[in-house]
Amino acid sequence: MSKDPREWLRQAEYDLDTAEYMHRGGRYFYAVFMRHLAVEKVLNWLYQERLGEIPSKTHNLIYLAEKIELHVPGPLYDTLFLLNRVKVPRIMHCIIRGTFCADVAEAHDAIRPCKNA
């Protein structure tokens, strides 16, 4: 990652566009995966902006939000928590095995109403 924190936002926007494309195509696991990455990159941007350092490598959204002391309102926190629960390795496990994972499907359903929040 470059030292310019705006790069996090550029990548997050691209990932979110990819998530929407995957959702329209019915590839829901990939949509959840890309949404997780988009949220993670926005949190990394905030981390770098607020703390003045490059964030540690983690996929833990709750850790990042707490580290930067981000206040997340109730319904969005619930979605963040759910998205964090499935974690990137878990999503990839479902994709690679080609299996249905209820927690990933639950995260996908929870994200849809919050995408415009």
Image (cartoon, rainbow, N blue to C red):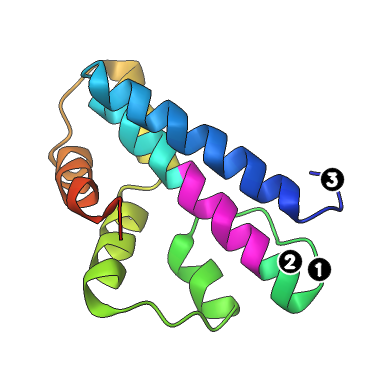
Residue at coordinates 50% horizontally, 72% vertically from top-left? 65
Please determine whether, in this image, residue 114 is positioned above or below residue 90.
below
Q: Which residue is mark 1?
A: 53
**Mark 3 / mark 2, whichever is N-terminal:** 3
- The reply to whether residue 90 is in sight is yes
Front residue of 62 and 52: 52
- The reply to whether residue 94 is in sight is no
Magenta stretch: give its range: 37-46
**Mark 1 / mark 3, whichever is N-terminal:** 3
Q: Mark 2: few, some, or many residues within 10 Å (few <14, many ≥20)?
A: some
Please determine whether, in this image, residue 58 is positioned above or below residue 18.
below
Please determine whether, in this image, residue 13 is positioned above or below residue 65.
above
Q: Mark 2 and mark 1 in contact (Cβ < 8 Å)?
A: yes
Q: Which SS does the magenta portion mostly show?
A: helix
Distance CA(mark 3)–CA(mark 2): 11 Å
Distance CA(mark 1)–CA(mark 2): 5 Å
Front residue of 53 and 72: 72
Mark 3: which amino acid? Ser
Mark 2: which amino acid? Gln
Q: Which residue is mark 2?
A: 48
Q: Residue furthest right?
A: 3
Please determine whether, in this image, residue 111 is positioned above or below residue 82.
above
Residue at coordinates 47% horizontally, 52% vertically from top-left? 39
Please give left or right for residue 26 compared with residue 115 in the image: left
- In the structure shown, which secondary structural element does the residue marked by tag 2 occupy? helix
